Amino acid sequence: MTRTARLKAFAKLNLGLRVLYKRPDGYHELRTVFQTISLADRLDVTYEPAATTKVEIEGTPYIPDNLVGRAAHLVLEAMELRAQVHFDLKKNIPSGAGLGGGSTDAAAVLLALPVLAGKAVPEQKLFEIATRLGSDVPFFLHGGTALGIGRGEELYPLPDQPKARLLLVAPEIHSSTPEAYRDLSAQLTTNSLQNKLFTFQQQLWDRPVGCEGEEMANDFEGVVFARHPALGELRDRLRKAGASVARMTGSGSSLFGIFDDAARLAQARKSFDTERTFALSFVSRRQYRSAWRRALAPHMQSPPIENQPSPLKGSLWPPQNLFAQ
């Protein structure tokens, strides 16, 4: 039986990002706050059982070594299934911009294929596969607002942020993540570690990230702006345009501003007419999961009548084909 689904793979912001030290395994110890946003790629999936596995990806633009293909092979292997799987990927999230575009596409495959195949995959196994694919991928199995520790894969849910209007500026500047880490590593000291931890913890306790006041820092800004001064100028322009918070996400190169009202955001967007911009909003964990259930609803058992318990109305996650074995 051939099954199809149209998925929305949402982007993320790092509302704050502190780099603490380089670990013995070569990765860096991080503290970050992830937030899903309304910008999303579109992924059309066609699944058909077959004697041999074949995964095809069409996309605009074409992306070599796409994480979508790797995710599909890994989750099919975990289910011990062979299938013909076709993906048609429409990229709306700018690549290499600190928005998690490749990671969210991979997570979309991990969430959707078990439902289309009708075979459950334990959440822990999905997490293991996600971690193999990239440090940001596990976050997209859940969405909403979350604290990320370690490489960012150790996740803890945070309360939803207040509703916010965002202006995302995505310039045509490539910010190299390896270079950013290399530049930043030279600045990491024991004193900076203690200060960063205290400040990060205090800000999480004191106020929602999107409120006015002291902003959560992104440690990459200093080194990335030194290499690309135009990015620092764009952040300053967001502030001058009325953003209550203006920050770079990830290691760049995208920047976002949070605005108090739609009129001010619209006026600010006009001042960035030579840049690629998006007017967006936060996506809560509940909204994120609701979007997934809507996308996969044709392949899930309809909820029973209102006065009977239903796994779909509760906290069942990840989404499952309820006839799955």
Image (spheres, rainbow, N blue to C red):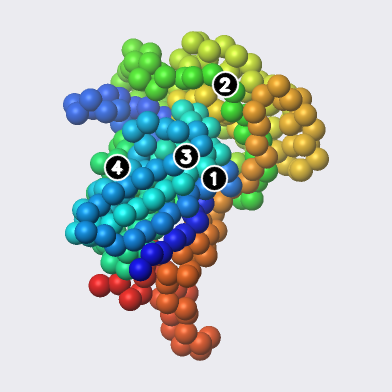
The residue that mark 4 highlights is 70
289 in relation to 300, above or below: above
Nearer-N-terminus badge (4/3)? 3
Image coordinates for residue 150, horizontal then vertical, percent: 30, 37
Residue under pointer 3: 59
Q: Quadrant of residue 276?
A: top right
Q: Which residue type carries mark 2?
A: Glu
Which residue type does callout 1 highlight? Ala
Viewer-nearest residue: 54 or 152: 54
Disc 1 from disc 2: Cα separation: 19 Å
- Which badge, 3 or 1, is on the more N-terminal residue? 1
Classify mark 4: helix, strand or loop.
Answer: helix
Q: Residues within 10 Å of mark 2 (few under 14, many from 20)?
A: few
The residue identified by callout 2 is 172
Counting residues from the N terminus, which is met first, the one under dot 2 or under dot 3?
3
Which residue appears at 77% of the width and 37% of the height?
Answer: 266
Q: Which residue is mark 1?
A: 40
Residue depth check, mark 3 versus mark 1: number of the one nearer the observer: 3
Q: Mark 4 or 1, which is nearer the eye?
A: 4
